[in-house]
Image (cartoon, grey):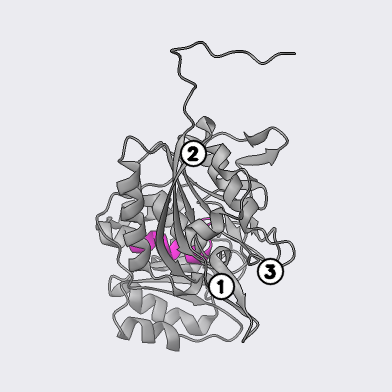
Amino acid sequence: MTAKRVKRGTKRPSKPHVLVMFTGGTISMKIDPLTAAAIPALSGRDIVSQVPGLRRAARLTLEDYAQLPGPHVTPRWMWGLKQRIEAHLADPRIDGVVVTHGTDTIEETAFLVDLTTETSKPVVFCGAMRTLGEPGSDGPSNLLIAVQTAANPDARGHGVLIAVGEEILAAGEAVKTHTQSLGAFKSGIGPLAILDRNGVRFVRGAVRRRFVKTGSIDPRVDLHVMATGADDALLRASLARGARGLVIEGTGAGNVPPLAVPAIHDAIKAGVPVVITSRCGAGSVAPLYGYEGGGAQMQRLGCILGGDLVGQKARILLMVALAAGVSDLALKALFEAS
């Protein structure tokens, strides 16, 4: 079979133009021979050179934005990154944006961008669980999948995505569930798209997303995890240092030990919103129990039940909502949205 000739004067279809922002994380690290531990070391160009076929997937523009490990990320830094992403999305020459990021906090940054950015263009986060050079290094394949996703017309309108382990997850659903596994990220509903022999294939419709219009983020929200016998000392410390909101990961469907209840009550009386989530990591909180500290009592006190959001994402949503000046009723509706 002979290849079809392209007539003179006709242009080949141009590949989508994807801008790749490198912000750090394990995907940018190498093992330091002196300490035998991973440290940031690679530029965007260094990483791309390790991904065969990447430039066949799209026309690329590379930007070295930062070299931060995931735990060094802060809410204000996330907000600056979000603004930079928006600037790129506003460029009509850019068809999609890929962001490399440390996996420890990738779900929080991606969720923030998803909550506060209006665009139909794809924004795809990716990272790595193993550094380049380690057996089974996953950074190159995750970056390739992220670029292929951002270049895929079917990705438009799906919101912010996270590409890891040959799956593409919605930012609002993705949660890191394992410390070291290559399949560390999961969604309770399943992936939006998967990678198969034919490339990236979307297997679900667009998810329902929350959106908050705001020009800033308020980082003064503290997250607390409940355990047996926990009292309210740390909750009161948060209030004393000026927390504007509290997120509590309760046990089970959203219950707290009785000793923690007085500070929760005082916080609500002082106008500090308290959001109840679950430390379980999956499932929704609900007002099932009427005993002291049970979810039903928490709801009667005026706590907001955080639906199926994990604590770290509920914290991001509360930070954004407080900065936007969302009213009490609207705040409750934001967390109940699914």
> Disc 1 designates what residue?
291
Give the vertical position of 78 relative to 210 (above or below).
Answer: below
Instruction: Pinpoint residue 221: horizontal percent, then vertical percent.
Output: 37, 71
Tell me where the magenta segment starts and ends, as one range: 307-319
Instruction: Pinpoint residue 213: horizontal percent, then vertical percent.
Output: 29, 49
Q: Is mark 3 on a helix, strand or loop?
A: loop
For residue 115, side relative to residue 149 (left or right): left
Q: What residue type is labelled 3?
A: Gln
Label 1 Cα crowd, 10 Å radius (few <14 / some 14-19 / many 20+): few
For residue 120, side relative to residue 327 (left or right): right
Q: Which of marks 1 and 2 is nearer the N terminus?
A: 2
Q: Is the magenta stretch mostly helix, strand or loop?
A: helix
For marks 1 and 2, give the CA distance.
41 Å
Q: Is mark 1 on a helix, strand or loop?
A: loop
Please identify the quarter of the rendering in which residue 285 is found.
Answer: bottom right
Mark 1 or mark 2: which is in front? 2
Q: What residue type is labelled 1?
A: Tyr
For residue 281, side relative to residue 274 (left or right): right
For marks 3 and 1, give the CA distance.
38 Å
Instruction: Pinpoint residue 104: horizontal percent, then vertical percent.
Output: 55, 68
For marks 3 and 2, give the CA distance.
28 Å
Please give the label number shown on residue 275: none
In the image shown, does 139 or 226 lie closer to the viewer?
139
Is 317 magenta? The answer is: yes
In the image shown, does 64 or 296 lie closer to the viewer?
64
Q: Earlier in the sequence, mark 3 or mark 1?
A: 3
- Is residue 19 visible from the viewing direction of this image? yes
Whether residues under marks 3 and 1 lie with C-beta atoms below 8 angstroms apart, the answer is no
Quarter of the image where the N terminus is located: top right
> Disc 2 designates what residue?
158
Please give the label number shown on residue 180: 3
